[in-house]
Image: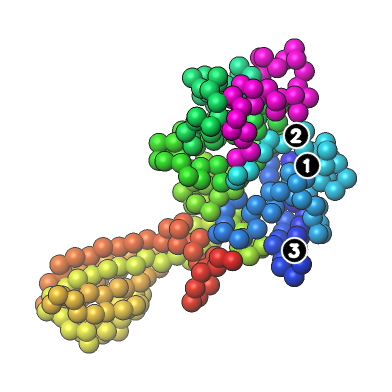
């Protein structure tokens, strides 16, 4: 089990991580989500013992990153956002080099190499130079170097950055396969990436944890609303403004005339559905409904609500 306790990291006056605490269970795939500059990469670098914390600590079973960094590194496979490859080496030679750096014994090296090559789908390129590989295969080589020593924990920082849609699907499936045997932490600012692979997600914003839970839990905790877009004939702006007097459960957000049609946006709680009452109101007032579309609050809306301040972006 991984336990992060009151972790802080300051760069001068900048608080990159601000006293966060969370746990990761054995065998769990955790999504670590947040906008650029949120503190994701800094947290992962402390976990991998690449950086020292300003305060707090991270525990891996009975070890901690302050006192036992060397032992913790042996338990972790790490794929940083900038894939650490030597372009002038062949794939096989590079993985052999990493295995030597990881002190893998010669009598188990070949067996482990074959396992990693098959798992990461590198059979057809194992004797090619890394500089000849596509972005997708380079990411596969990066994953291979991260798991060559069969680590207990796998940390992946933006593992699908720059990949095309087909390559993204391939890497996702590979991560899911690895997650059956290892504890995996995936960092990303792409919501769909976490949603497709993780069992649970943590949303971090400006160095603080903004949310922690499964997708279902995050959605249930967020008081979401449904937005209803309507286009009608035979109605004026003043007519539409009166609708909330009769149907108390809805809120008129905006209304305008566009191409001789009255276009409006209504909002109401996800727990109710007033569309039938809205239709009856329209009939009573001789409106002709040309279009009625609803958009329920999504996980993207929850993420934006938690990470974007009113009036602008959150990025640093």
Q: Does 263 appear in magenta?
A: no
Horizontal and vertical percent for residue 41? Answer: 65, 52
| Among the 4 quarters of the image, the one containing residue 83 | top right
| Residue 309 percent coordinates (x, y) | 53, 72
Nearer the observer, 119 or 92: 92
254 to the left or right of 167: left
| Sequence-earlier tag: 3 or 2 | 3
- Crowd class of label 1 (few under 14; some 14 to 19; many from 20; radius 10 Å): some
Q: Is residue 266 left or right of residue 224?
A: left
Give the position of the N terminus as an image quadrant.
top right
Q: Does the CB distance between marks 2 and 1 fall below 8 Å? A: yes
Q: Which residue is mark 2?
A: 75
Q: Which mark is in front, 2 or 1?
A: 2
Determine the secondary structure under disc 1.
strand
Residue at 69 percent of width and 62 percent of height:
16
Q: CA distance from mark 3 to mark 2?
A: 27 Å
Name the one closer to the observer, 34 or 95. 95
Q: Which residues are magenta?
A: 83-112
How many callouts does the rendering have?
A: 3
Q: Which residue is mark 1?
A: 60
Give the residue number, with chain letter if any, for mark 3: 11
Q: Earlier in the sequence, mark 1 or mark 3?
A: 3
* Majority SS type along the magenta span: helix
Q: Position of residue 43 (x, y in %)?
A: 70, 53
Local crowd size for mark 3, using a 10 Å CA cut-off: few (<14), some (14–19), many (≥20): few
- Labels 2 and 1: the sequence-earlier one: 1
Q: Could you classify mark 2 by the number of other residues whose Cα lies within 10 Å: few (under 14), some (14-19), or many (20 or more)?
A: some
Q: Which mark is residue 211?
A: none
Q: Are marks 3 and 2 in contact (CB under 8 Å)?
A: no
């Amino acid at each position: 089990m991984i336990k992060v306790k009151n972790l802080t990291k300051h760069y001068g006056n900048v608080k990159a991580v601000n006293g966060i605490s969370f746990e990761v269970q054995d065998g769990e795939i955790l999504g670590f989500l947040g906008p650029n500059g949120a503190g994701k990469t800094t947290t992962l670098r402390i976990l991998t013992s690449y950086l020292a914390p300003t305060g707090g600590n991270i525990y891996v079973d009975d070890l901690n990153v302050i006192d036992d960094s060397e032992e913790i590194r042996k338990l972790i496979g790490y794929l940083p956002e900038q894939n650490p490859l030597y372009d002038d080496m062949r794939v096989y030679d590079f993985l052999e080099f990493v295995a030597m750096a990881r002190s893998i014994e010669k009598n188990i090296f070949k067996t482990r190499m074959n396992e990693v090559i098959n798992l990461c789908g590198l059979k057809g390129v194992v004797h090619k130079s890394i500089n000849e590989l596509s972005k997708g295969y380079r990411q596969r080589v990066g994953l291979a170097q991260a798991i060559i020593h069969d680590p207990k924990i796998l940390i992946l920082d933006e593992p699908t950055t720059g990949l095309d849609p087909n390559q993204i699907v391939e890497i996702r499936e590979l991560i899911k396969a690895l997650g059956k045997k290892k504890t995996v932490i995936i960092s990303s600012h792409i919501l769909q990436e976490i949603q497709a692979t993780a069992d649970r997600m943590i949303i971090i914003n400006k160095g603080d944890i903004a949310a922690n839970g499964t997708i279902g839990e995050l959605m249930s905790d967020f008081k979401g609303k449904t937005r209803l877009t309507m286009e009608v004939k035979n109605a004026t702006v003043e007519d539409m403004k009166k609708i909330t007097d009769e149907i108390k459960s809805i809120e008129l957000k905006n209304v305008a005339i566009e191409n001789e049609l009255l276009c409006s946006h209504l909002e109401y709680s996800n727990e109710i559905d007033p569309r039938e009452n809205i239709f009856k109101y329209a009939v009573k007032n001789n409106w002709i409904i040309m279009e009625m579309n609803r958009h329920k609050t999504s996980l993207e809306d929850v993420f934006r609500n938690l990470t974007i301040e009113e009036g602008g972006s959150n990025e640093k």
